[in-house]
Amino acid sequence: MASTTEPTTDKREEESMENPTAEDEDTGAQVAPIVKLQEVAVTTGEEHEDALLDMKAKLYRFDKEGNQWKERGVGTVKLLKHKETGKVRLVMRQSKTLKICANHLVLTAIAMQEHAGNDKSCVWHAPDFADGEVKEELFCIRFASVENCKTFKEKIEEIIESQGNKSVGSEEATTAADLMEKLSVGESKDVEEKTKEAPISAEEKKDENAKQENPGDDK
């Protein structure tokens, strides 16, 4: 059972100001660049989606083994709607490294709740794909103000309500099946390897020894 203990608060500033450096002395010397860098196109995977919400927040994940909240990162949480399918997913990246710390569809099964004792935080369960495999996670997200938290929660509820009963269940099942297929392929290979390496049972050894002692019985 998830603990209702509030995640610890880090009072340090989340965004630090860069200290201005002293002006470099101009010697007049011409220095040619050692390495010439080329521009590289960077794709985020969000090119075919429209942002419905974009806010700064801090994310926590509940660690069942340690029975405590663990920080996933500080960054930007987005609600992205696909231009063709209309599906909405929640994506959050860490501000400095841009590492994904949350990535899942906004499904009708999600129940967004205010965190007990903190009106700036929300808690919810979701099958998340941030780590490259589907994991059932318990998240807690904290915003800088009560208004931001309320806006986030209301937007999630609005998206869920808009989905209605238009065969969302089948779409969710298909999506989950597609994600789980990646896992099942790896699991099936492991089963095959374990089957090949499985030891021979005592009865099978007894039958083989009997056949070797009485080879005429097989004729």
Image (cartoon, grey):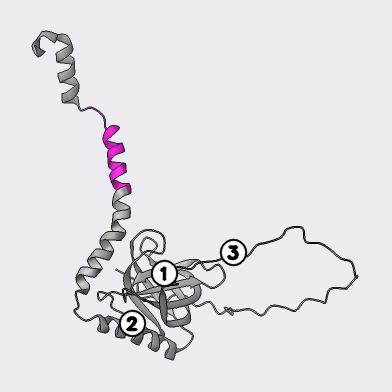
Kindly state the secondary structure of the residue where label 1 is placed: strand
Report the amino acid beneath label 3.
Val
| Left or right of 9 in this view: 89 | left
Q: Earlier in the sequence, mark 1 or mark 2?
A: 1
| Circles 1, 2 touching at the beta carbon (< 8 Å) | no
Percent x, y for residue 178?
A: 29, 60
Q: Earlier in the sequence, mark 3 or mark 2?
A: 3
Which residue ends up furthest to the bottom in the rendered image? 147
Percent x, y for residue 13?
A: 59, 80
Asked where in the image residue 37 lies, by quadrant, the reply is bottom right
Percent x, y for residue 15?
A: 60, 79
Give above or below for 68 relative to 86.
Answer: above
Residue holding disc 1: 102
Q: Residues under labels 1 and 2: Cα distance? A: 15 Å
Q: Is residue 188 magenta?
A: yes
Report the amino acid beneath label 2.
Ile
Could you tell me which quadrant the C terminus lies in? Answer: top left
| Left or right of 177 in this view: 204 | left
Residue holding disc 3: 40
* Magenta segment boundaries in residue numbering: 186-200
Image point (57%, 70%), residue name: 96
